[in-house]
Image: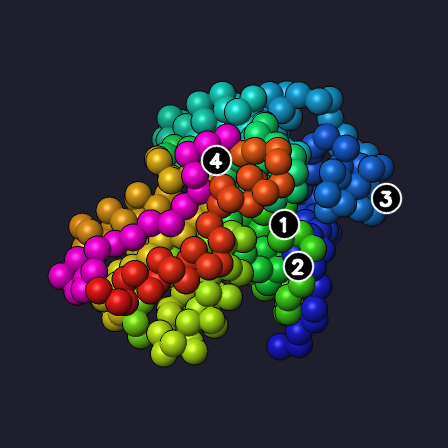
């Protein structure tokens, strides 16, 4: 299989373009996604290829976008909708949580809602408290939704194509700071199955479980700790719900130690669910140290750049957390 190096945002665009060429029922809805090309430039050129019927600039109303997408999905189309900042999913919650997530179940499988909610999340761009949150744990709490958070260009493309082909509503989180990062992506058509984690680095001393932009920092920490003969295994969740519990448990059974790292606020974050998964499994009997969580501070994201950096886990903090599990 041939490989090419592209950015994360180009991988997302390629996934949408290839799927829209493959299936004329796929439409794309969102604010400024057409002529402007999207707030982060993800959809540049798409309206020129597919026209305004299939790439539709919408009013500035997330409630309207989501309501339209749910209706379109329930009546035969396969919409991709973009929420410009993931914070604004709050405005679309009724359509997503009370309608999209419930419809297939409530109609006994006779209806389906094949839609994708693409949305950039996370801090680090100086966008302040209302445009920088990581709210993925909310979505994971809703039965009927699938939740995806890719960390690399290859994963972003393969997972988005799988999400578009899925017959259920999928919330697809893209971290803003990852858009410009580059990585190798297969040239051939491929999908990555939803619900499968990926071991990004094999190791024997400690398991680090992460997703999104924290993967890069966990990898940097693992490389630094190699000099101290600490061998770190990194599990990248990729799909947050349904979570690949089997891969997590197997890794922790091997290493006997677990650190969970995510950008979202610690209280009520996905880390608690991962910790409980380990504690309730056979992996608990293999633990040589308590399960540890390293997450975002429980504060609104500050505008001040130095304070903003201090809110989410830094590479040196990840290193220290790993050392604390090893040296006891």
Residue indicated by mark 2: 181
**Mark 4 against mark 3, which lies toward the viewer?**
4
Q: Where residue 135 is drawn, which disc sits there? A: 4
Q: Nearer the viewer, residue 80 or 275?
A: 275
CB contact under 8 Å: marks 1 and 2: yes
Q: Secondary structure at mark 2?
A: loop
Disc 1 to disc 4, how far (Cα)?
A: 16 Å
Q: Where residue 177 is drawn, which disc sits there? A: 1
Q: Quadrant of the C terminus?
A: bottom left
The residue located at (41%, 62%) in the rendering is: 319
Q: Quadrant of the N terminus?
A: bottom right
Q: Quadrant of residue 248?
A: bottom left
Q: Nearer the viewer, residue 175 or 97?
A: 175
- Residue 286 falls inside the magenta stretch: yes
Q: Where residue 48 is drawn, which disc sits there? A: 3
Residue 6 visible somewhere in the drawing: yes
The residue located at (64%, 69%) in the rendering is: 184
Q: What range of the chain is rendered magenta?
A: 282-300
Q: Pointer 1: residues within 10 angstroms few (<14), some, or many (20+)?
A: some
| Left or right of residue 200, residue 77 in this image | right
């Amino acid at each position: 299989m041939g490989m090419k190096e592209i950015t994360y945002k180009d991988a997302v665009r390629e996934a949408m373009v290839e799927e829209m060429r493959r299936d004329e029922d796929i439409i794309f809805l969102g604010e400024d996604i057409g002529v402007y090309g999207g707030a982060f430039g993800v959809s540049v050129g798409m309206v020129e290829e597919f026209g305004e019927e299939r790439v539709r600039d919408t009013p500035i109303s997330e409630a309207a976008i989501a309501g339209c997408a749910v209706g379109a999905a329930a009546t035969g189309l396969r919409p991709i909708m973009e929420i410009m900042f993931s914070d604004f999913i709050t405005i679309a919650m009724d359509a997503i949580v009370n309608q999209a997530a419930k419809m297939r179940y409530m109609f006994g499988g006779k209806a389906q809602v094949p839609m994708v909610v693409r949305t950039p999340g996370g801090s680090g761009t100086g966008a302040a408290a209302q445009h920088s949150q990581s709210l993925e744990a909310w979505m994971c709490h809703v039965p009927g939704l699938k939740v995806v958070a890719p960390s690399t260009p290859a994963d972003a493309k393969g997972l988005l194509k799988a999400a578009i082909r899925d017959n259920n509503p999928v919330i697809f989180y893209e971290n803003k700071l990852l858009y410009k990062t580059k990585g190798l992506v297969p040239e051939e058509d491929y999908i990555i199955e939803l619900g499968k984690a990926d071991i990004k680095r094999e190791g024997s001393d400690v398991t680090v479980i992460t997703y999104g932009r924290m993967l890069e920092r966990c990898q940097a920490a693992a490389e630094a700790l190699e000099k101290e003969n600490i061998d770190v295994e990194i599990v990248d969740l990729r799909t947050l719900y349904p979570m690949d519990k089997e891969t997590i448990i197997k890794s922790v059974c091997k290493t006997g130690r677990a650190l969970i790292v995510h950008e979202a606020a610690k209280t009520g974050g996905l880390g608690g669910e991962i910790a409980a998964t380990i504690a309730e499994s056979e992996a608990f009997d293999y633990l040589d140290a308590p399960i540890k969580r390293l997450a975002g501070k429980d504060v609104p994201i500050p505008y001040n750049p130095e304070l903003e950096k201090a809110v989410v886990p830094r590479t040196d903090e990840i290193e220290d957390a790993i050392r604390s599990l090893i040296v006891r």
